[in-house]
Amino acid sequence: MPVGRGRSFGIRSDFKAGIAYMDAFELTRSLIDINSVTPNEREIGDFLFEFLRPLAQRHGGMIERQEVEPGRNNVWAHWGDPEVVFSTHMDTVPPFIPSREDSEFVWGRGACDTHGIAASMIKALEALLEDSVRGLGILLVVGEEVDGAGALHANRSAPSVKYLINGEPTENLLAVASKGTLGFRIRASGRACHSAYPELGCSATDLLLDRLNRLRDTEWPSDPLLGATTLNIGTLDAGPAANIVADYASAAVVIRVVSDIKELTALAMSVLDGVDVEFFSQTPALRLHRVEGFETSIVKYTTDIPKLTNWGRPLLIGPGSIRHAHTVEERIPKAQIREAIALYERLARSLKDSGSDR
């Protein structure tokens, strides 16, 4: 089984026979060193399948690949009837950045989003299974960074599960709420002409900018728990040249949702007359499951949880900071990886105890 770009530290020569000896840091680095930028998840999916297969065999579990698209597979493993399922994603944002480490951090693309999380979950599973705990599962999905294709696929064939522990960087705090997203593209049309005679045309750029300013001036809802709605104009494109009045203009906008998404959509559309609007993301804000004895937080990003509605009551927790995700300095503290292994183990035990439900 190839591991990344020729690096093989932490992998014994008998790995292909289904035996791997790695600590959590080695496993994190091995995952980072596989280029898994969406949609290139074949290699990391094969790696994780082969890594988990001996764990399934030793403890009477089942493991399978779920084909989402040719060459793109979720990995699903479980031990007994799964009551508690760990889940995170295998893909990363570009560009591929290989791993390195120092005394404090593991660095590289996917370190905290979410290869260090996957490694922590796997190591927690190992400890639980060695202690004869069953009723567990792990679901590793493709495509979270783009369209959630892996989660949507998994949701169509979900087993009966009580709790889903989803992994994203929360600095090991149990997130009790997350903002949603409303993403859309605005396209304005005009009539091109020579820029010296603008009265002969109609500027699509002016129309687009007017509508974007209306969005910026709108009074958006706020929520006592999640805080303010925020708006980001992410991309702009207009016209073929600076000396031509533009006959087309477009922008992509993402709103971070804290209120009812249908009402927010209607509010946005009320100021976007005269332009075409295409929605590419409509994810509601979420309130998540709480567990006594775990410190909590609020997160402003979205996850695969809204696409995994058939996988039980959702929880969200993981090592690393979202502030380092998607950056060239992406990293995860080694101390938080160690802590996460213990937290995941304790959380799974707590959830399997009916007395933990609130």
Image: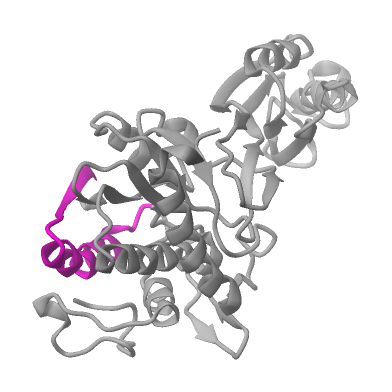
Is residue 264 depicted above or below 222 in this figure? above
- The picture places residue 30, in percent across and down from the top left corner, at 37, 77
The answer to whether residue 16 is left or right of residue 293 is: left
Instruction: Answer yes or no: is residue 235 visible.
Output: yes
Is residue 332 depicted above or below 197 in this figure? below
For the record, the magenta segment spans 39-68
- The picture places residue 100, in percent across and down from the top left corner, at 52, 85
> Is residue 100 highlighted in magenta?
no
Q: Along the line of sight, which residue is nearer the eye, 358 or 206?
A: 358
Q: Picture quarter containing residue 38?
A: bottom left
Quadrant where the image shows the N terminus: bottom left
Instruction: Answer yes or no: is residue 95 visible.
Output: no
Q: Residue at x 24, y 62 (%)?
A: 132
Is residue 51 depicted above or below 159 in this figure? below
Q: Residue at x 39, y 49 (%)?
A: 87
> Is residue 66 highlighted in magenta?
yes
Q: Picture quarter containing residue 149?
A: top left
Quadrant where the image shows the C terminus: top right
Is residue 235 depicted above or below 250 in this figure? below
* Scheme of image coloration: one colour
Q: Residue at x 51, y 42 (%)?
A: 315
